[in-house]
Amino acid sequence: MSGVFDAYMSNLDSERRDVISRLIQTVRDHLPAGFTEAIAYGMPSWVVAHDRYPAGYHVTPADPLPFLSLASQKRHVAVYHMGIYADDSLLAWFQDEYPKHMKTRLNMGKSCIRFTNMKTIPFELIGDLVSRMTVDEWVRDMRLRLGADTSPQATGAACSWTAVSCRICRG
């Protein structure tokens, strides 16, 4: 593995490096196009770059809009998926799917999914999770949460929904 995550990976022990490396590859294999790899908050991350979403992260506009991060913490490996925090239906789907892949109880915060056993991480489920939200959907959801105009006319994005089903831009 080479690139933007090299320095982060070099600081991990071999077990954690293998797990994080496999998670990075899972994300790369399944994440829809349009997200950018970066180190954000000291973690391997996928963000919406300023050239795609100039407003950046509403808390710190100089930073790109965060979407997904991975971290090796003291007692667990974490997957931080901001979309699962913002989209109730995605959260419900994940909570329903988790027991189908794991024997252990779901250990989760608002957007943090914690795995304490490095040998039982459900990579297939993580791949499915990260594939379920496109960059345009994430930007639209964030703009909606912040009360901004989310229409394709305002965002410059192409609407992927039909006029009948689009609750945001009606077209």
Image (tube, rainbow, N blue to C red):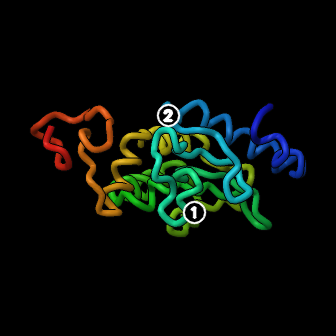
In the rendered view, does 125 fall on the left or right side of 41? left
Q: Position of residue 77 (x, y in %)?
A: 71, 57
- Mark found first going from the N terminus, 1 or 2: 2
- Percent across and percent down for residue 1 are 79, 32
State the residue in front, 97 or 9: 9
Mark 1 highlights which residue? 112
| Quarter of the image where one finds residue 40 | bottom right
Q: Is residue 150 left or right of residue 138?
A: left
Which part of the image, by quadrant, shows the C terminus? top left
What type is the residue that disc 1 sits on? Cys
* Location of residue 73 in the rendering, given as x and y in whole percent from the top left corner: 76, 63
Above or below, 157 against 151 in this view is above
Viewer-proximal residue among 116 and 62: 62
Circles 1, 2 touching at the beta carbon (< 8 Å): no
Measuring from the top left, give residue 138's x and y in whole percent.
Answer: 41, 48
Query: Which residue is drawn at the image coordinates 42% and 39% (left, top)?
Result: 134
Q: Residue 34 got which mark?
A: 2
Does dot 1 land on a helix, a strand or a loop?
Answer: strand
- The residue located at (52%, 52%) in the rendering is 65
The structure residue drawn at horizontal position 61% and vertical position 33%, both measured from the top left corner, is: 28
Q: Is residue 120 left or right of residue 84?
A: right
CA gap, disc 1 to disc 2?
22 Å
Tell me which amino acid carries mark 2. Gly
